[in-house]
Amino acid sequence: MRDAEPVPVRLADYRPPAWLVDTVDLDVSLHPTATRVISRLALRRNPEGAADAPVVLDGDGLTLVRVALDGAPLAGGAYEATPQSLTLRAPTADRFVLEVETLVNPTANTRLMGLYRSSGNYCTQCEAEGFRRITYFPDRPDVLSVYTVRVEADRAEAPVLLSNGNLERNGPVADTGRHYTIWHDPWPKPAYLFALVGGNLSKVPDHFVTRSGRPIELGIYVEPGKESRASYAMDALKRSMRWDETAFGREYDLDVFNIVAVSDFNMGAMENKGLNIFNDKYVLASPETATDADYAGIESVIAHEYFHNWSGNRVTCRDWFQLCLKEGLTVFRDQEFSSDQRSRPVKRIADVRTLKAAQFTEDAGPLSHPVRPDTYREINNFYTATVYEKGAEVVRMLKTLLGEDGFRAGMDLYYDRHDGDAATIEDFLAAFAEATGRDLSHFALWYAQSGTPRVTATGAYDEAARSFRLDVRQETAPTSGQSEKKPVMLPLTLGLIGPDGADQPLTLGGSNMPHPVIEVTEAEQSFVFTGLDARPVLSLNRGFSAPINLSTNLSDEDLVFLAAHDADPFNRFDAMQGLALRLLKTGAAEGRLPDATPLVEAARRVLTDTTLDPAFKAQALALPGENEIAREIATDVNPDAVFTTRRALRAVLAEALAAPLGETYDALTTTSPYSPDAAAAGRRSLRNLALDYLTSGATSEAIARAQAQYGAADNMTDRFAALAVLSQHDTPARTEALADFYRRFVNDPLVIDKWLSLQAQIPEEGTLERVKALTLLPVFSMSNPNRVRSLVGAFAVGNPTQFHRASGEGHNFLVDVVLGLDATNPQVAARLLSAFKSFRQLEPARRASAERALQRVAVTPGLSADVADIAIRSLS
Ligand code: PHE
Ligand code: ZN
């Protein structure tokens, strides 16, 4: 069924709910095509809501069986029911119990929202508005209820039956072959956190004792046979639980914590209270099947969902405009967790790469929106890099401004004051303002104003005055829906580095700076640092303290100096990237790469510096990706020129550094068994980066080395890295290795995803045909989001030369897939379509092709709200 024309929802129209639901008693009798749901809602008129408002419950595609009020069946005239809503006509008491019985068909649910089946198992997904696909309910996050859930199913079909909270009872249903469990969750929660699972699953058990001594039973449920692949996730869970106690003082609050891994899931994972449901990609790992990046992803998603127990569940969102309240904060928390578990600088570099690739691109195009949007047509389309990643950056800036202790005091106050509430961004900021006495009203603009500020910093040393003057200008370009922009508050961490490479003491306005942070609040501002005996080199926005596009008057020599000496590892990395970007921009514009000697020498120094962490080296030596280069160029981008220039620069580096690269590769070759820890992963990442450079000339010797690594690898990281290198060169070795990989892993869908995505990203003319052929393989399925993302998503986002082919065939292919998928899974279809988000930066012919493709979507009748919304906004 297709959706009707989407009506915009506005933050300004928010009104408190007219009716509250104190308790929800659900009785769910699972059946493949006719699951019966009986819900008993204790409704109470909200004294803060509109007086006399009738009871209106949300639905989505529901089949109503019966309605009863305080135990008495309601006659047809007393209510109005459609698949989309249930309205009580008659005036009612201010408090009553409504009983509603509905039927749903989980097998026919291809949207993967509400109750659906994955590999035969039953599971639910309710965020954002999926609960209304299970039963009629005021499906909004500011209605919080205590849930008691009875789940019943055929024992053979679903021996495991789970819901939120603690297990109260279970047993057989006499003479039926069926059984039931009853779960009770004492913590009031919004409907989007409801979950239920039924199926044939194996439990990986463990336990945890909280710091106050409460024992918690932990369980990770996976498909039988996959138990051993859940051990890393379990370890990550226990580390997350301990970390939230020590870093934020937050303990777990139920007797059980369960995680279920399912193979059909629209997103990464879901934080349902006490019953997280995960895309199995973020649970299952073994050395033979998962890469270091997969392990790191599991660690951070497990942590993310667990941390939501406080930032999201105990304190939830008043409405969906406040989504960043839980998501930005929880991303910040999971980033901090991973930083503490691994290398902080390397984690920060990786996070900023993600931020720039996903969020800066989004903010530079037609889908740009504020961290807290003020209007939406389809909330599913706002689970974006802006809400998540920029939302996390805003929290990070808050911490930079307030300091460690001020930030913690604000967090404590926020949790204490809003525990059990549905809160807003204003509530969040008020807690920090009150805890620290700081006025955050200007800072709050970060939530309302979209776009990435462009900051220009000009430094000048005055030898006579022994001072350094820093002029900072900021400007944010107009974005869709916002033509007027104001200056935002920028906390810029900085250092002034002396000729000896050491940070100089910072004296500003005559006094020493206790914290090396300047706060820029105006469009133009100057800072004069004094007491400097020699010309310093400016290191600004250390640690990427503000999410901005920064340009400076630093020379290439200054960048080379920073790459060698900056005490801030992030800015050492950034200086390398800056040098490379300057070359690549000029190279792409002029069709000829300028002299790369400064970059080569800086790279040589990084590569041969024995004091540096290999993981850091790998990040610093990896060239900016094609999409990042395109974003820097910003207008009239020709993806072929970007690609060619990047290839050329890679070859220059590879040739100049052949000897140290070869030595690095050999020195990092090890026979010790695989371990996913950060240090070992860092060594592999540098060795595999060296392999990539060494193979760039595709000499037979180099191809043979990659082949040897492929064949000898005892882990997926090294095997897949070798395959990735081979995939970039059109040789028989590629064909062989791809065939071998397929044979080895044909029964392992998560590994096949890697194989699909690698081939989708081959930057060659034949790739589109290859991708189309891959869609026909039995291992591929349009109904599984992971498969679709791995093949079609990787092609659209990770293969700019082929997706943006001048012929328009790449664009057309994506549109065909989107329109086909829209009928069954609009959420995934809409996400694929957002691959056009940067089309306006393309050169005119490709831009026109993308526009035609988007228009073809927009004029298609019967689009889902999800896809229609992306098409309309992309074209606006
Ligand atoms: N709330 C989930 C998270 O942890 C994301 C999600 C949104 C999952 C909607 C499913 C549906 O970020
Ligand atoms: Zn989240």
Image (cartoon, rainbow, N blue to C red):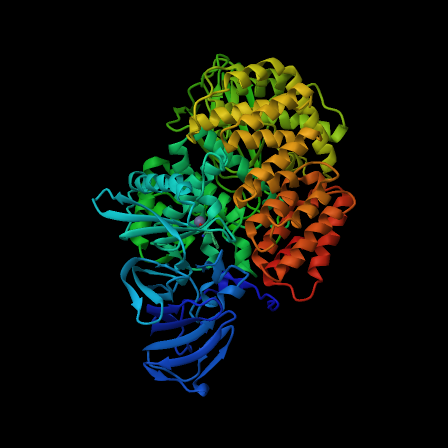
Q: Nearer the viewer, residue 399 or 439?
A: 399
Q: Nearer the viewer, residue 539 or 772?
A: 772
Q: Quadrant of the N terminus?
A: bottom right
Q: Is residue 567 above or below residue 323?
A: above
Q: Among all residues in the image, which is located at the extreme left?
A: 213
Whether residue 58 is visible: no
- Percent across and percent down for residue 570 are 49, 28
Q: Could you tell whether 479 is left or right of 407 in the image?
A: right
Q: Is residue 170 above or below residue 834?
A: below
Q: Is residue 116 above or below residue 513?
A: below
- Percent across and percent down for residue 169 are 26, 63
Q: Residue at x 46, y 44 (%)?
A: 282
- Percent across and percent down for residue 275 are 37, 54
Q: Could you tell whether 43 is left or right of 634 in the image?
A: left
- Percent across and percent down for residue 58 are 47, 70
Image quadrant in which you'd find residue 108: bottom right
